[in-house]
Amino acid sequence: MSANRTSRPDLTAASAAPGTAAGTATGAAAGTASGLAEFLRTRRSRLRPEDVDLPDFGGRRRVAGLRREELAQLAGVSVDYYTRLEQGRVGNPSDAVLDSVARALRLDAEEAGHLHRLARTRPTRAGGVGGAGGAGRGQARGSAAPQKVRPSMARLLDAMPDVPAVVMGRRMDILAWNSAAVALLGDYSALAPAERNIARITFLDPASRTLYDDWVACARENVAFLHLEAGRRPDDPRLAELIGELSVRSQEFRQWWAEHPVRDKTSGHKVFHHPLVGRMELVYDTLRSADDPDQALVTYTADPGSPSEDALRMLISWEADRVARPR
């Protein structure tokens, strides 16, 4: 999103109505049995027999990657059990079995946690899906309530006027921001509250493609985090609507969503091409409160003494002058 925005697409006009393709595109988003099946199939497709020290007898393989029987052998379970697990027909798989499957698939810690959540998802009486022991239903009620920025997070934003920062809530919603973030990322107050979402802006605002040097990497990170959110919040209707809309309106989102990536939002480097100050290399960090991980403070900083630090200071100064000028 450009801070010097001249035009924006109409992000609400093409929102899909319930029951359209946007609604049907979210089966995997809700953490259903199909989501578990897609996750396991994509991870099986990444491995070859030689990757896991299994003999490959040659010939044409009808499936990409490992066969179900090969994965079952590696995990130490029967083929029938693994097939039922992949189809979401195992009522309460044990941690030991899921850990064995995760090891067989060479999953990292985030992917293994995602597997556990998907495998424990249950249909609810209301027709949604929930976690074992009713945890999913309780989470759904919390997800339905409008989220407000924590007062302590708001104070942190005010206390760092020289550091671009936003508070990210559930579904990558933007709950609050400071003036430095406006200078770097754009004025979120110009958007309707429902449109203040990092993934939505990244995929549907054309200015994002020029602001980020590696837009593809940024967009893929958003897809991976939304998959993680979908596993955590299997019956969040607003999350399903967001994924449905992005699936309908972005071919790239549809393609990358089908790959079922899973990755948390933590820290890293981003290169910006800002229309006012040009190229900046910034570090982003995602800081979560231990007692409320549903809200995260996302900050952007530059290396001390670097040209990027000078550019960022100049950009923030220009924004402060713009706000201070009489209208």
Image (tube, rainbow, N blue to C red):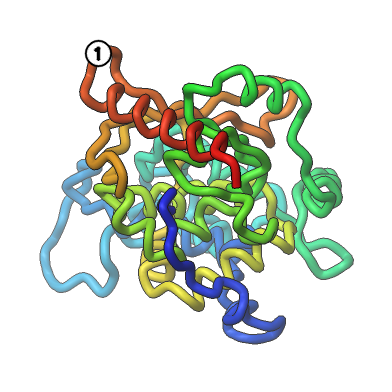
Q: Residue at x 27, y 45 (%)?
A: 273
Query: Is residue 68 shown to the viewer in this render?
Result: no
Residue in front for this viewpoint, 226 or 100? 226
Say whether residue 174 is left or right of residue 220.
right
Q: Residue at x 40, y 35 (%)?
A: 108
Q: Where is residue 134? Give x, y as percent.
A: 85, 47
Instruction: Check disc 1: other Cα within 10 Å, few if <14, some if 14-19, many if 20+.
Output: few
Determine whether 98 is above or below 208 in the image. Answer: above
Q: Which residue is mark 1?
A: 305
Q: Where is residue 158? Give x, y as percent.
A: 64, 23
Q: Secondary structure at mark 1?
A: loop
**Outermost residue, front side:** 326
Q: Residue at x 58, y 29 (%)?
A: 297
Residue in front for this viewpoint, 111 or 1? 1
Q: Where is residue 167? Give x, y as percent.
A: 62, 35
Q: Where is residue 3? Give x, y as percent.
A: 43, 49
Determine whether 35 is above or below 107 in the image. Answer: below
Query: Is residue 211 shown to the viewer in this render?
Result: yes
Q: Residue at x 78, y 49 (%)?
A: 143
Residue type pointed to by label 1: Gly
Residue in front for this viewpoint, 163 or 133? 163
